[in-house]
Image (spheres, helix red, strand yellow):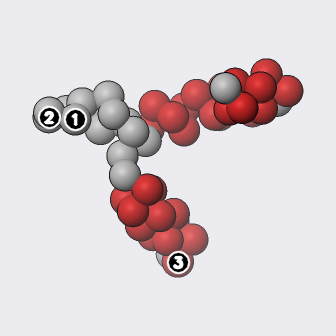
């Protein structure tokens, strides 16, 4: 519930960005469809973005 409190405090543009982030961090298909990807994969994605 803390996440919802933090999102409510954000400016509108940041709320949209947060929603896009959550949507992009969901598995698109398979038996884990719509589940948030693992923390390991999230870190790998962040490393890929920041290292390039």
Q: Looking at the picture, tell me which residue is in the foreground, 44 or 49.
A: 44
Residue 52 coordinates in the image, percent (x, y): 51, 75
- In this view, the mark in front (3 or 1): 1
Residue at the disc numbered 1: 32
> What is the distance, in whole Å, between disc 3 and disc 2 at their CAs?
29 Å
- In this view, the mark in front (3 or 2): 2
Q: Residue at x 37, y 59 (%)?
A: 41
Residue 40 coordinates in the image, percent (x, y): 39, 62
As drawn, is 17 to the left or to the right of 47? right
Please identify the residue farthest to the bottom as the structure is shown: 51
Q: How many numbered marks appear?
A: 3
Q: Quadrant of residue 30?
A: top left
Residue 25 coordinates in the image, percent (x, y): 43, 41
> What is the distance, in whole Å, between disc 2 and disc 1 at their CAs?
5 Å
N-terminal of the pair, mark 3 or mark 2, is: 2
Residue at the disc numbered 2: 30
N-terminal of the pair, mark 3 or mark 1, is: 1
Q: Where 7 falls versus 37 (above or below)?
A: above
Please identify the residue farthest to the front as the structure is shown: 1
As drawn, is 24 to the left or to the right of 34? right
Disc 3 and disc 1 in contact, CB within 8 angstroms: no
Residue at the disc numbered 3: 51
Q: Residue at x 51, y 34 (%)?
A: 22
């Amino acid at each position: 519930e803390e996440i919802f409190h933090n999102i409510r405090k954000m400016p509108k543009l940041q709320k949209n960005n947060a929603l896009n982030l959550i949507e992009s961090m969901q598995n698109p298909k398979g038996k884990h469809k719509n589940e948030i990807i693992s923390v390991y994969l999230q870190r790998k994605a962040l490393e890929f973005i920041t290292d390039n």
